[in-house]
Image (cartoon, rainbow, N blue to C red):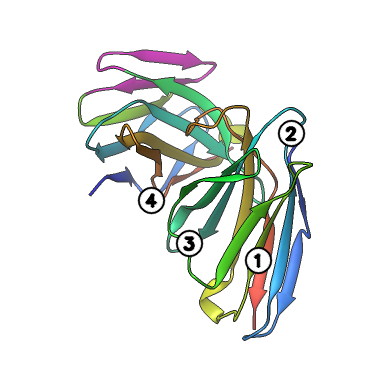
Amino acid sequence: EDQVTQSPEALRLQEGESSSLNCSYTVSGLRGLFWYRQDPGKGPEFLFTLYSAGEEKEKERLKATLTKKESFLHITAPKPEDSATYLCAVLGGTDSNYQLIWGAGTKLIIKP
Amino acid sequence: DSGVTQTPKHLITATGQRVTLRCSPRSGDLSVYWYQQSLDQGLQFLIQYYNGEERAKGNILERFSAQQFPDLHSELNLSSLELGDSALYFCASSVGQGPNPYIYFGEGSWLTVV
């Protein structure tokens, strides 16, 4: 069964303290891995797309990387405004039935 | 603002009742997706419509149904509500018919079943 697992469930950091969020996946036919940011009471907002192992994408203080079994979202010198829930999703399945499969998210709290 | 509009924003109803959630997609988007998000289950895909036709089905209960109208707005109908149906229901839209990471989410409808 296709599955996406994110860890940790929650992460509290001091402002400026770098860390990484993990997204591990098992999927029959990976067609891409995606990271989203979700603020409280809002819908998820697209951040990155990764398609192949070794690929990296960066945006401001965030960098996403991909291996054959997992992805990391690295956050460097975070600021309080980076506080949000970060969701990972993979596009998997067969040619006739593929869908986004979502992880449960990591709630990131950055304290000033 | 994603351009996806959902109503109502908040809804409180009793068990056994029926509610309808409404979604207007972004201008030009033909696909509408419905998701359920609860604290213990994360984001669960329910159903997708493309240009009025059902395109894909996820973990949608038989008590739930949806449709997409000719003007492309969509409605999610939830009936015989149970306490466990309390959740945040998101609508999202995209241009194409395939599953698409470039989907735009609305702000959700909070449903509380008491």
Residue topped by disc 4: A9
Q: Nearer the viewer, mark 1 or mark 2?
A: 1
Question: Which chain is indicated by disc 2?
Answer: B
Characterize the local packing of mark 4: few (<14), some (14-19) or many (20 or more) Cα atoms within 10 angstroms: some
Residue topped by disc 3: B60
Q: Nearer the viewer, mark 1 or mark 4?
A: 1
Residue occupying the point 74% across, 33% down:
B26
Residue B10's place in the image compared with A58, above or below, is below
Residue B53's place in the image compared with A35, above or below, is below
- Point out which mark residue B17 bears: none
Q: Quadrant of residue A95?
A: top left
Q: Quadrant of residue A23?
A: top left
Q: Position of residue B101 (x, y in %)?
A: 50, 30
Q: Position of residue B93 (x, y in %)?
A: 64, 37
Residue B94's place in the image compared with A76, above or below, is below
Give the mark nearest the N terminus, 3 or 1: 3
Q: Which residues are magenta?
A: A52-67
Say whether residue A76 is visible. no
Q: Are marks 4 and 3 on the same chain?
A: no
Q: Nearer the viewer, residue A17 or A95?
A: A95
| Tag 3 and tag 1, C-beta contact below 8 Å | no
Give the mark nearest the N terminus, 2 or 3: 2
Q: CA distance from mark 4 to mark 3?
A: 25 Å
Residue topped by disc 1: B77
Q: CA distance from mark 3 to mark 1?
A: 11 Å
- Point out which mark residue B26 bears: 2
Question: Which chain is indicated by disc 3?
Answer: B
Q: Circle 1 sits in a helix, a strand or a loop, which is it?
A: strand
- Tell whether B80 sits left or right of A48: right
Q: CA distance from mark 4 to mark 2?
A: 32 Å
Residue occupying the point 38% across, 50% down:
A9
Kind of residue sitting beneath label 2:
Arg
